[in-house]
Image: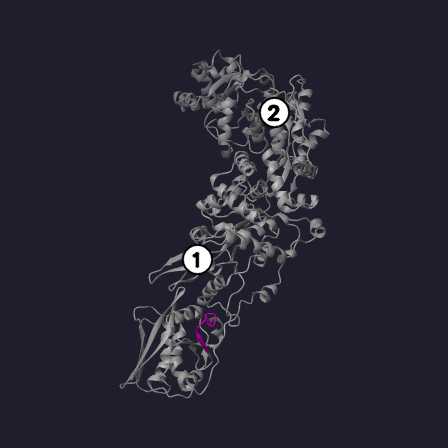
Amino acid sequence: MEKKYWLGLKLVPAIDKRFSKIINFYETAEEVWYAKKESFLKIYGVSSELANEIIKQRESIDLDKNWQRHKKMGIEILTIYDDNYPPLLKEIPNPPNVLFFKGDLIEKYSEAVAIVGSRRATAYGVALAEELALNLSEAGVTIVSGVARGIDSSAHRGALKDKGSTIGVLGCGHDVIYPPENKRLYETISQQGSLISEYPIGTRPLKWNFPARNRIISGLSRGVVVVEASEKSGALITVDFALEQGREVFAVPGNTKNILSKGPHKLLKSGACLIETSQDILEELGLSHLVSSQLQTDRLAKLNEEEQKILACLGWEQKYIDEIIRDLDINPSKTASLLTTLEIKGFIKQDIGKKYLRIH
Amino acid sequence: MLAKTESCSVLGMEASLIEVEVDISNGLPAFNIVGLPDTAIQESRERVRSGITNSEFEFPLKRITVNLAPADLRKEGPSFDLSIAIGILAATKQISREKLLDYLFVGELSLTGGVRPVSGILSMAICAKSQKKKGFIVPKDNANEAALIQGLEVIPVTSLNEVVDFFSGEKQIKPATGVSLGISEESSSIDVDFSDIKGQEHAKRALEIAAAGGHNVLMVGPPGSGKTMLARRMSTIVPDMTFEEAIEVTKIYSVSGMLSSKKGLVSTRPFRAPHHTVSPAGLVGGGQFPRPGEISLSHNGVLFLDEFPEFSRSVLEVLRQPLEDGIVTISRASSTLTFPAKFMMIAAMNPCKCGYLGDKLKECTCSPSHIRKYRSKISGPLMDRIDIQIEVPRLTKNELIGISTGESSKKIKCRVQKTRDRQRKNLDSKNITCNSQMSPRMIKKYCNLSDSAQDFLENAIDKLGLSGRAYDKILKISKTISDLDEKNTIETEHLAEALQYRCFENVSNY
């Protein structure tokens, strides 16, 4: 029942301002919930206005109803005093006092790495985030990210591809699905991994929630990988937290002409670790004993000559179908059919505007 | 005194015989026309009166009653002028009455007594032939058109006097002879050609396939990438019309009054590009006396809809049924009419609201929800009717300068023509002339996959997540590709190419 009162405290915004001070003053959350005004005033830093506000807000809350709603949605509550609170997260300067989570217990996860980046990622970034996440999770690493559009979603998808584990950190209550198109992803993560949030049900995705969420993303992880980010991206906020928390920062370089490379390149210039493959991350974190599965080089050998020519022509940059036709000087009909074959074999990926990208 | 002549009235695409009875009796001078005439026919009284007096005939100062029978059929337009005037002249014995009923009379009178052209002549000539008339008196400017119908003596006239002289035997008028299908000179004079377009090899190939199989196409690309240019050149590679097809098209243009006097026959496939502000009635046809709309005007030809999502939803949705059936039925209070509408649709649109999604040079500023909203303007059922979707990228400056131009329209057309002929032979069906018109049952019958192609298709469905509706489209396109390749079965490579033209639906990641 103690958990119920923890939920109650999270629901009172006035308490949130002095949360640690108040909770440390009392033995249990239940005591806080039933405390009188005089008792609050004894706490250093609690003014009489604040105490009044706490009591006023507390009275307006139907705690039992809220508690039932959380139970019904399958949301568990984890407090900072619990033994299974993630130890890495406990170390950070401002750890969340209460975590609401859905899915597996977080303590199950061993090593975690965060993959973050732009919400408006390119096909290159999307493919790369997926590949990194897949390879890392094959090596047994948990992937942490923010379930946002773009890189975040691809990182989760990559991890889920091979039944790997992944943690999605939300910037809102569990009842809000943001962005809405990620509904399916929400469900899969809560089944195969876990979704966590420091906000109770009913909290909307307000913009100041996201920087706070980012400190949890980096807090849960050993390192943060930035795939694609513009100079003002939220991903760089996560990096700031990571540095403050003493985590590793990794950056994946991109095309110099792309604005989305500005973020990672800036990090690289100031000393972040350059990442080409998942192996680089594992080595840097001292996890190279967890061998990531190698690219199947022999798969390449199975392709016929023309298919290999197309792959060679594509290199690792995006090309329009017309450019391939011109570069290789084969007729459009043949090129089209070869590209489909390669797509089906999983070597290339199509992007909007008939652009092709090699992914293996 | 009573006189009778015969004329024609067009409703929709078909003409019906109208008897024009003129009675002149004693009484106060009056001139009445009965038999559901519209305003243009009521006004014909004035034209006929002046036309007769100015041709130096006598206009009787008696009570004139004109009846247009059958009286319950609504009649419109000025084409009865000539037959009414001839009727009056016959009733007053100013013209020889002997052979009058062997001929049909059609034409508008001018005040000077001249005969002006009218619309719908081809349908009327067909009616004259079916009524076993010996001849057809037509305005000279319409003569070429009427002469398309064999076995009918088409007498071109320029004035009322000429008609009188013809029947009195004072003047011989040489019947107009039919024009042959003189297509080659005309089409070669078109000043657009596929070789004008630089790059876009993929799009060009897709349009060649579309022309060969009659498939509907959607082109997606940023502004300035050449979508309109490509579409305009479509008419240079579509195969020539057969004579029957040309007659059908001419009939439509004739009843819409859009036929120029010189040509007589519409010999090149129509290309229509209505603006996106077009109304539903403008697109499918309509009006009190329904007239063909843009889709019927593009019958046997190409209907190009530029800025596809900008068309209003109601306009786009009315396209669904004609795209399926090849005809459009219009019901109005006065009548229900059917117009042919077998056309190839080419639509063009931007990939998103700002226009630059996926562009190399300029960044797109749309949010995912904007993109989805923009794309959802084209409904699923409409998308189902579009077989080929191509992306048309914008070329950079260097590419524009560096790239050589491709094949000429003539070369492409030659291949397309061959493929069409092949299809017509293979499909041995009366109603169908190209692969795009195949029904699901015919797809099963005619689209034979080789064994390896079958495996490939199953694999593709799995890997690329093809929907059921995409499946039929892919088969139809592969069939056309294999026809272009002059093969009887669909091979893996045909299938693989066809998959490139599928609709790319996956925008969720962006």
Residue toward you, A112 or A304: A304
Task: Report the residue at 59% width, 39% height from top.
Answer: A340
Q: Residues within 10 Å of mark 1 (few under 14, many from 20)?
A: many
Amino acid at pointer 2? Ala
- Give the percent coordinates (x, y) of residue B462: 52, 34
- Give the percent coordinates (x, y) of residue A271: 72, 26
Residue toward you, A338 or A4: A338
Identify the mark at residue A267; answer none if there is no mark.
none
Q: Is residue B73 above or below residue B356?
A: below
Q: Is residue B499 visible?
A: yes
Residue B48: in magenta span: no
Q: Is residue A120 visible?
A: no
Q: Which residue is mark 1?
A: B284
Q: Are marks 2 and 1 on the same chain?
A: no
**Range covered by the magenta-colored residues:** B146-155
Q: Disc 2 on helix, strand or loop?
A: strand
Residue that sits furthest to the left in the current view: B27
Q: Residues within 10 Å of mark 2 (few under 14, many from 20)?
A: many
Amino acid at pointer 1? Val
Q: CA distance from mark 2 to mark 1?
A: 57 Å
Residue toward you, B328 or B241: B241
Q: Which residue is mark 2?
A: A114
